[in-house]
Amino acid sequence: ILHIAVPEFYYVPEGMEYTQARVLKNTQMASIQYKYRGKNVFFHLASNEKDLSQGNWKDRDQIKVETLDEEINVEVGKLLENNEEYYYALWKYKDAYYQLGGDIEKEEIIKILNEMQYNM
């Protein structure tokens, strides 16, 4: 619907389950929600970077993730939302922007990213 490449996650932490997805055609954005250990984890896809959360980032690191056709630079760090700190990853692939995070460990996010592929 949004004409955005959607990665496949070949690693998902044990106990992490899909709960819902929302597609917002007007803003060209999608949000997929998961439950992990009773907490929320979100995966956002957007055609415009400004539509993704831009809160107070802390402890930002740059990592590289290999996909089938290129290496992607990913920013990983903590984001302050509603007086809580959550780990997030933010990256660009082709002409779209992605954000994965929530109440999940940084190491788990990195494992997910290292096992994702864009199959186009």
Image (cartoon, rainbow, N blue to C red):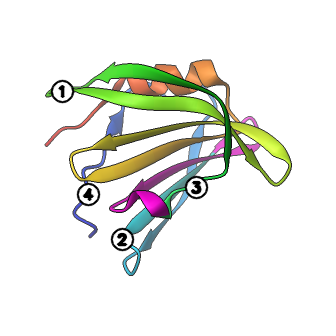
Dot 2 or dot 1: first in sequence order is 2
Q: How many marks?
A: 4
Q: Amino acid at mark 3?
A: Ser
Choose mark 2 or mark 3, whichever is in front: 3
Dot 4 or dot 2: first in sequence order is 4
Residue behind mark 4: 4
Residue behind mark 2: 28
Q: Which type of secondary structure does the marked residue at label 3 adopt? A: loop
Dot 4 or dot 3: first in sequence order is 4
Q: Residues within 10 Å of mark 1 (few under 14, many from 20)?
A: few
Residue behind mark 3: 53
Above or below for 105 versus 23: above
Q: Residues within 10 Å of mark 3 (few under 14, many from 20)?
A: some
Q: Amino acid at mark 1?
A: Glu
Above or below for 101 versus 3: above
**Alpha carbon of mark 2 to alpha carbon of mark 1: how far?**
24 Å
Q: Which type of secondary structure does the marked residue at label 1 adopt? A: loop
**Alpha carbon of mark 4 to alpha carbon of mark 2: how far?**
9 Å
Residue behind mark 1: 70
Q: Which mark is residue 102?
A: none
